[in-house]
Image: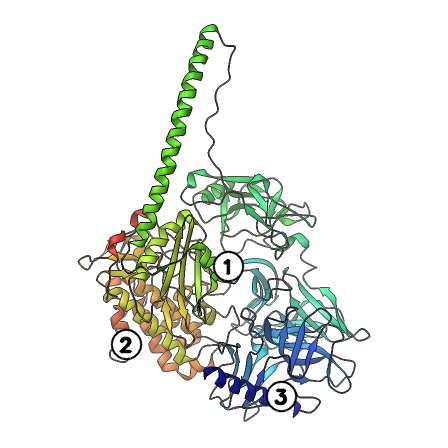
Amino acid sequence: MALERYLCILLLATSLSLHSLHAQTIDYPTANLSTLWINNRAGPHNVPFQDGTKAQAILLRKNPDPDGPSFAAGFFSDDTWTAFLFSVFIVNTNSRGGITNEGLPQVIWSANRDRPVRENATLEFTKDGDFVLRDSDGTLVWSTNTPGKSVVNMSITESGSLVLFDINKTPVWQSFDHPTDSLVSGQSMRQGMRLTANISTTNWTYSPLYLTVLADGLHAFVNSSPPQLYVNYTTNVSKPENNSTYLTFTNGSLTLFTKPDKPEELISLPSATSDQYMRLESDGHLRLYEYNRSRHDWQMAKDLFSNKLEYCDYPTACGEYGICTGGECSCPGNHFSQINNPQAKFGCTRVTPLSCQATQDHQLLPLDNVSYFLYSFGAGEYKGMSKESCKQACLNNCSCKAALFQYEGGNTSYGYCYLPSQLFSLRTNQPTKTHYNSSAYIKVQVIPSPPSPGPNSSPTSEEKRTSQTGIIIGVTLGIATTILIVIIIFARRKCSQMHREHYDQVPGMPTRFTFEELKEASDNFSKKLGEGGFGSVFEGKIGDEKVAIKRLDIFNQGEQQFLPEVETIGSIHHINLVRLIGFCAEKMHRLLVYEYMCNSSLDKWIFYKDQVVPLDWQTRCKIITGIAKGLTYLHEECRQRIAHFDIKPQNILLDDKFNAKVSDFGLAKLIDRDQSQVMTRMRGTPGYLAPEWLTSIITEKVDVYSFGVVILEIICGRKNLDYSQRNANLIILLQEKMKVNRLLDIVDSHSSDLKLHGEEVIQMMKLAMWCLQSDSSRRPSMSMVVKVLEGAMNVETCLDYEFISAPSAPSSTIYLDSSSLPSVSAFSGPR
């Protein structure tokens, strides 16, 4: 019956889609409410191109110039015809208004780069004014989130922007406000907007390379912690007005406006003889393309960074750890080997991975005449440090991957020290470059060698007899060693068996899978959903149920996180905690199988790295409440209190109805009911650490502090620590705005809905401030937080607004040693 209903809906939708398109004139740039389109091969305006790609247009704005290109919106597919983007693309049309396959389509905007849909996916312009993309199984993939905003129609404009208009013909939503990797003529980028490159020409996933407008100009970064700058174009205006800077691209001009009356051309463009657009591409280059009217195709007109950067100056020119020399790539010595990956042009990987458990075997590999790509050291550098101090600082910090040193002018004793936690391309020095007086030292893991014997002299007769005796002893020892090895192998097998039995004996243990079962379920781990902690997460399917499979990548350290996570999640059940379906503990393989959360993690919805639609106020409140209820259960409703220790948006997962579920219990610790506090080493993520971590004497109130940080990030739409912004620390900015009573200045600028609920937003921010109290005893319990959220209690009014946080660390996550981990028998909370 369900299948019949689906087929009926599909047939009706197909009829609607065919009708909606065939009823249009030759030029169909506008659609009205209650229109549905289906991505299928039977639909009209389905055009294959010479490179194997395909486009199905649902809207078309035909160029009034018969020799010029036109803009269309619809489904665009790669050459496999299995993955589709809803996008705006540039095409050629004939005199009758049909799309031709002359030239190649140019995608200038897309809604779902990280989540392509399949055939029979649907686009619906709903009767209440929302524009929604769903996959073929009905899963929500993307939406403009505009219901109830008096939207009456949708149109693609002459400049190529997809716009939703209200009854007064005022734009309610437009694609130009959510750029992906391209700018077309007439488009502007306001301060804070980004262009983010694709991974490659065939992989639409977001790469770490992005271009953004800041108060003083245009900056290109490679994303890391903190972001690393590789080129910028800054204004000559001494004091740009706050949040007023924007960049406008018109044919032949790229102009920066820091003040309404202060336009400044940032990059010189070639004179426009035809239509132009620019794109930030997978290699980090910003290229300008111009339409060739005679060939009806696009050709590159200029590499816009070429006046500042050469080939080796780009952060991905030779991949991670690769050394670029005159356009050729190599790996640094015997400690690295080339990555065999067709998706990556080049890159190097360590022969021996770095281990934080063996820091005594870390050494720095000096690279002669080599420096970093970095345009300028920027955020994260240390100034006035000696080279030896710089090198020692890297050896003392496990997250440091290299010590990069640059002399300060003619001073060879002191200079700039940069300690990156992620290392991209290096380059050989050039005398003409300002970074000529620089040096690089890459951290490597060495395997200690046994001491070599001393030099031998000519043997005497006594020495010969000694040698013969030695041979006899050696043979005897060899036999004994062989027997010992057999015993060790037997003992290891027995130990391994006992270890497996140890996992099986945990009460309430979820289903145990073999590695081959999970390998097959995940199609050989082919679809990666993301990374977190010590593992990568892959999509899989067990029976008819879609699952998320977390594979621990670093066994020595990950083993410490594996058992606590299995035992913690396996023994507790709550609607706001992620459900653990099963696990695998086979040989060196450690995997966890979770319920699949189709809307991924919270950070993707509030930090806009995937260009998603802003969440409305009610959805944000629902997520905050869900997190609070999950933590209340951990802190107060289990036999022993469970402190999570790593509450952050990346560890909050969202289901199809945006219910929040707390995940990733790898750092969790139990606190007995009769204990007021515990002592433990610092663990968690910089930016979310409570001040008491400095004392190592903590309670579950550290989770309350982290929860307060997450509330702020949800409301403000940005990370607490974001070095790409003028005010890098959100908590300090909150403190400043509280003093002048201007809290609404820092709420998410992407969402007009938050401004409509201004008073409620301010109350939520005050709840966050209550959670952020420096004195942990003054923070509320999580059950009190839930009461506030449900309206049964008010926020404390006597608060300290001088917030203090634990110091930031360069690593993304701080972990502990095994001595602080809970015992096996400790986990037996209520089911």
Q: Nearer the viewer, mark 2 or mark 1?
A: 1
Q: Position of residue 622 (x, y in %)?
A: 36, 77
Query: Which residue does the image show at 46% across and 34% down from the upper left?
Result: 448
Label 2, secondary structure: give it.
Answer: helix
Extreme residue toward the left, this view: 674
Task: Report how far apart the C-alphas of labels 2 and 1 lie in the structure.
Answer: 43 Å
Q: Residue furthest right?
A: 294
Where 225 sits versus 215, above or below?
above
Point out residue 368 in the picture as x, y percentages from the top left corner: 61, 39
Q: Amino acid at mark 1?
A: Phe
Per the image, label 1 sits on a secondary structure element best described as loop
Residue closest to the eye, 642 or 211? 642
Q: Please give the residue where the numbered disc 1 appears in the rendered image.
A: 525
- Decide if residue 471 is on the left or right side of residue 772: right
Q: Where does label 3 land, which residue?
A: 18
User: In front here: 782 or 580?
Assistant: 580
**Residue 680 at x, y percent in the picture:** 29, 51
